[in-house]
Image: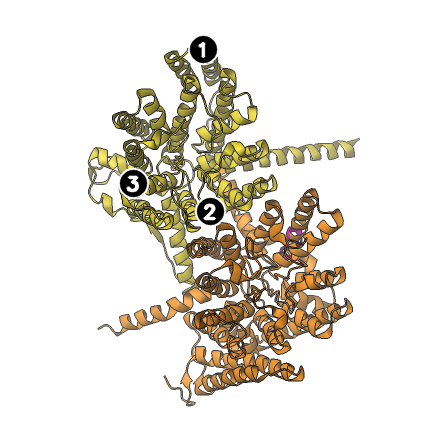
Chain colours: A orange, B yellow
Amino acid sequence: MVSARGGIRSTTAHVTGLALLFISLGMLLSAVVEYVDGTNGAALLMAATATAVSGAALWWSTRPGALDHATIFTAVGTTWLVASAFGALPYLFAGTFAVAGRPWAVVLADALFESISGYSCTGSTVFGGHNPIGSQGSGVLLYRQLTQWAGGMGIVVLVVTVLPSLRASGLGLIDAEAPGMGVDRLAPRVKDTATRFWKLYTGLTALIAVGLLAAGMGPFDAIAHALTTASTGGFSTRDASIGHWDSLSVELVLVVAMVLGAANFTLHWRSLASRRIVHFRDHEFRGYLTILGVGTLLVAGMLAIDGMGVGRALRMGVFNVVTLGTSSGFGNATGAGSGGDFVRWTAGPQMILLFLMVFGGCAGSTAGGVKVVRLRVGMSHAYRTLRGFRRPRALFPVRQGARTVPEAIVERIAGFMVVYGMLVVVGTVAVTALGTDLVTAVGGVIGALGNMGPALGDVGPADSFVDGFSTPARMVLAVLMLVGRLEIFPMLLMLVAPYRSLRGAGRSNRP
Amino acid sequence: MFSVLVIVSGLVDLLGSGDDTVPMVTLGVLAGLVSSIGYSRIRAAERVRDADVLGGLTLCLLLLVMMVSAAHLLIGTTGSVVDALTDSTAALTTTALGVLAPDVGDHAGRFLRAGSQWLGGFGGLMVAVAILPFFGAEREFADRSRLRGRRPMTPNRLTAMRNIVYLHGVVSVGTWIGYVLAGLGTFDALMVAMATVSTGGMVDGDPFADPAVQYVAIAGMAVTGTSLVVLWRLVVGRTRGLMRSAELRAYLGLLVLGTALLLLWTGGSGPDGIRRAAFTVTAAVTTTGFPSAPAGIWAAAAPVLLLGLVSIGPMTGSAGGGFQIMRHRALLKVALREMVRQLHPRVVSRVRLGGRVVSEATLSRIVVVQFLVVSVVFATATVVAAMGLDMAAALGVAIHAISTGGPVRALDGSLLDPTDWSAPVRLAILPAMVIGRLSVYPAMVAASSTISAVRHRVRLRRRILSYRGRAG
């Protein structure tokens, strides 16, 4: 349908076009870094040009249209799919995964996997012993980190900051993309809310970079890791991830930064606005810290019992519990079989890490997983159901602190958890059918849905996903990463929505 | 019931040495006397709450576990309290994770074990068909309608119980006769039949080496995994529209699809391969858990398939455990409704199962069951992993325990022997078995009631102390 202003009316294409323009800027910046570094940045420049031209064409030729629920899900889902596809171009043009003897389909799949893992802030990687990260140019490395930074706060949120024509409907787009149960308004105008989120995010990133510099990282590594810490992504510029530095101060800075990244950004904003720390008044944040604290104590205790010294067990426990409990996925293993290589730990601590991988961080943060608030509401709902057997006529509301959670929200959370559970089961069966063992499959699927990064079994912090999963299994995981990043429904409904509208149109055309 | 079981076990021992007859009969008589006195002296409350019934069920099962353990210790089947507790819990919860191996000549021990399983299966049926639909959860699924002159199976509690006794008895005797005709000795056939119809799965030796016995076992397990309501409809001739039941079709489909996939992933072929695969899959879906060693090389997906089938379980209203097909269908519909609600937030959408609208309260309780099951699996797996099992075994044990299925398999399909697990591991899985056998709610309601009562006492005591402090 052509609008009165000349362009084709399509919110999906318009938002996608603008998103492509944004990600092309990241590619361009990486190309510049590659040139400055003295290596050939032509591949990145080509990718940036192709992405920018495609994005501009989509943007100029379209105008935003009506924003009903179906369009919102289609727009957000399509934007992420297309951005991830174009995000693979730099790897393809640079021949990053074109190792001798590999079929082109596998190279394409690996490029897509790395791109999706980046934008979804998962941090799983197909780099490894056969194709080390260290052999890549600084431009490609920076681009990889930038994909996570862009994905952390959300590509669509970024688009809303510059798209005035969406007005209040933009909140629906942000809502569909943001982790958690909806987004809190930081300002009366949606555009201002989106802008404030991005300012806050940029500020946090800068603060982390300064902290890492002070802890002893070089400037490039500090900036690169700040990008993936604020976004709780977990990509590193080193093959051994954070284990490369083997530095307590670097790990401490990252632990604090990861916890901040996985906390609700609205709390950060309110703290800044009121100049008081309001985090501890929030029930979800307190629950989140309790989970991390108890998890750390249990893991460190078990590691100490298993023979690791108490100090080392505490260090390994804190870092790995926080990195997985915030869905970041950094590793502090200095090599396969070292203290931080948690897949070599006994099964007890690994089970606790698996639990943390399911629940992730707080709503309204950059973290993945089910989210602590849903866990709390789920527990509260279960408890009141059990109480209902003792007092059948009593009405027990589900509470979060002093506030009563509306029944509609409780039902939504219950529905979300059911779908999440089903995806874990279906994903695990699919991945094992493609040749992976149970533990690796469960870890990989929960890790992908929760946007964790490393998993269990054959794909620990010191391993590549190429070694643990076949190419089709990696594609299943890539789909789950996108589904998990968008909190399930947009990716599923973007497929259903056009079908439903077609069916609806068909029905309305009947005499 | 315990006293009858023990007395019969003692009398059965007369078929062999008869050494255990006197102690068993004495124990049975004593237990009977104590329970008769208790029954006559203790009056039921005038107003019985759902929670009281559910809590009472849990208490009954726990008492039975202790009494059967005591009986095993008394006749010397084992000298270990942990082994006796594990085996009696496994038997009464029909979880095929037993650790005792009574001698062939130990008739009392064998009968006590098989009888415990039969009692557990019977109890499971009572809970699922005659108790939960009347006290608490899933009321819609009871067969109560007298519309158009129908004869429902569960018009009220007493009739439901009577019909369960009748059907369970007929299926038990039928399976026994089937095993005898297939070539098993009368006593051995009775033992295997009780393990089959209860979905207990704990048998002595390897009675399934003969293909004919295996075929009877497949048929017996398949019937046992079918809802009693379906069997009732067959008995009273209400067969019209039976095959339109989505749950029955899903159950049969699961058996066929599971067999086909297991054949594919284990490289089996020919009639023998199909029989072996069907036996393994039926044992998994019905949560019976008869052991079957893997033939050939298993793909990574094969043990995962069996684990998935055990957690799905058979039809609702059968003796089997697991989450059961009806609940899975309800969850699937909840998931689909949630997707529709994302597109149309104000839509009013009802979930229908078996042609009936399911109330929101029932749906909510099913979702909570899923939440509780996942929580128990996580907690159990973490505890047993911390006690030394590897990740795959820990997850497998936890899922099997709450599904009351078995046996647990390693990643290559080989069977894990529960006797290799340490005593703390065995004790750690017992709560999951009890929760699973009682269809989750009774045990959880009992636990939450106990916690509430303790909290209430502590608070009251604190208040009294603080009042005394202020007064003093």
Label 2 lies in what chain? Answer: B
Label 1 lies in what chain? Answer: B
Q: Which residue is mark 1?
A: B19
Q: Secondary structure at mark 2?
A: helix
Under mark 2, the amino acid is Gln
Q: Are marks 1 and 3 in contact (CB under 8 Å)?
A: no
Q: Dot 2 surroundings within 10 Å: few (below 14), some, or many (20 or more)? A: many
Could you tell me which residue is drawn at 61 percent across and 57 percent down?
A: A324
Q: Indicate which label's residue lies in the foreground, 1 or 2.
A: 1
Under mark 1, the amino acid is Asp
Identify the image quadrant of the N terminus of chain B.
top left
Which sits earlier in the primary sequence, circle 2 or circle 3?
A: 3
* A287 magenta-colored: yes
Q: Indicate which label's residue lies in the foreground, 2 or 3.
A: 3
Q: Which mark is residue B272?
A: 3
User: Is B218 placed above or below A314 here?
Assistant: above
Q: Which mark is residue B370?
A: 2
Under mark 3, the amino acid is Asp
User: Is A502 placed above or below A488 here?
Assistant: below
Which sits earlier in the primary sequence, circle 1 or circle 3?
A: 1
**Start and end of the magenta stretch?**
A284-291
Q: Which mark is residue A397?
A: none
- x and y, in percent, of residue B240 in the image: 19, 43
Work out whether residue A80 or residue A65 is closer to the camera in this orientation and state it: A80
Q: Same chain for labels 1 and 3? Say yes or no.
A: yes
